[in-house]
Amino acid sequence: ALAKSAGIRTEYFNLVQMREAAREASEKAGKKISEKKFRQDYFRILGAFICQKYPVRPVAVFMQGWDLVVSDEFLRYFPGPKKGVYNVINFHPSLLPDSKGAKTVALSNGTMIPVLKGEEAEILNEALERKLPAIGVTLHYAQVEFDIGGLILDKIEIPIRRGDDFDRLRARHIKAESKFVADAIENWARNQK
C-alpha cells in the first residue's frame, strides 16, 4: 500500500495460489509434482515474470519480510558485481556475521552475541529469551545458502532495553528497519553509478 501511494508499481505473485493451481493441474494429468520441483518452477517463473513485466529490466531485487529461500534459478536472473554474487538483496531481521559461517556476531561495543536465524517473530522472541543486549537488521546479498553471513552491505543495531517485551521491541525494530531500508536502498543505488 505504501509503494502504491507513492506511485511505485507493485505486483503480487502468490506462492500459495500457484501451488494450489499446480497441484490441481498435476492431479488432472494423473501426476504428482514434488515440492522441490514446484519451488524450482515457482522461482524460475517469478524471475522471468519480474524481468518481463517492466519496460526496463530490473537491476536488483530487494527482499524484506521474505520468508522463502530463493533458488539459484531465481538468482541467475539478476547477476551482480562479481561471479557468484547476485543483485538480490535481502534485509535479514537480525545481525549476521561479516565472515561466512560464523556462529556469533560482534556488537559495536565488542560484545559477542549468537547469530539468530528465522522469521522476525522467532528472532525477536529468542533475543528476549536469551536476554541479549541488542538485535539488529542486516542488508546482504542473497546466496543459494541462506543467512550464512558474508557479502554484508550494511547493518544496524537496535538495543534491547530493560522492560522490553515482544510488542515494544517489535515496534522499535519495525521503526528502525523501515528507516534503514529506505537509507540502504538509496545508498546501494548511489554506489551503482
Image (cartoon, rainbow, N blue to C red):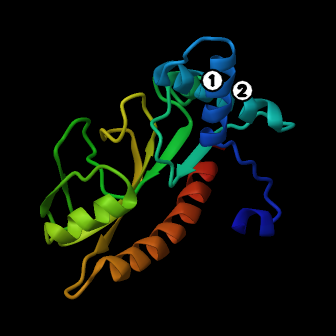
Of 106 and 126, nearer the camera is 126
At which x and y percent is residue 163? 22, 88
- The image quadrant of residue 192 is top right
132 is higher (above) or lower (below) than 143? below
* Residue at screen point 53% across, 61% down: 181
At which x and y percent is residue 59? 68, 37
Q: Amino acid at mark 2?
A: Ala
* Residue at screen point 55% across, 30% down: 80
Q: Mark 1 — residue?
A: 44
Residue lying at the far right of the rendered structure: 55
* Residue at screen point 55% across, 38% down: 88
* Residue at screen point 37% across, 80% down: 167
Helix, strand or loop at disc 1? Answer: helix
Q: Could you tell whether 69 is left or right of 179 in the image?
A: left
Q: Is residue 125 visible?
A: yes
Q: Mark 2 — residue?
A: 48
For the residues bearing labels 1 and 2, Cβ distance under 8 angstroms: yes
At which x and y percent is residue 38? 55, 24
Q: Could you tell whether 88 is left or right of 14 in the image?
A: left
Circle 1 Cα neighbour tier, 10 Å, few/some/many (<14 / 14–19 / ≥20): some
Q: Is residue 79 visible?
A: no
Q: Amino acid at mark 1?
A: Arg
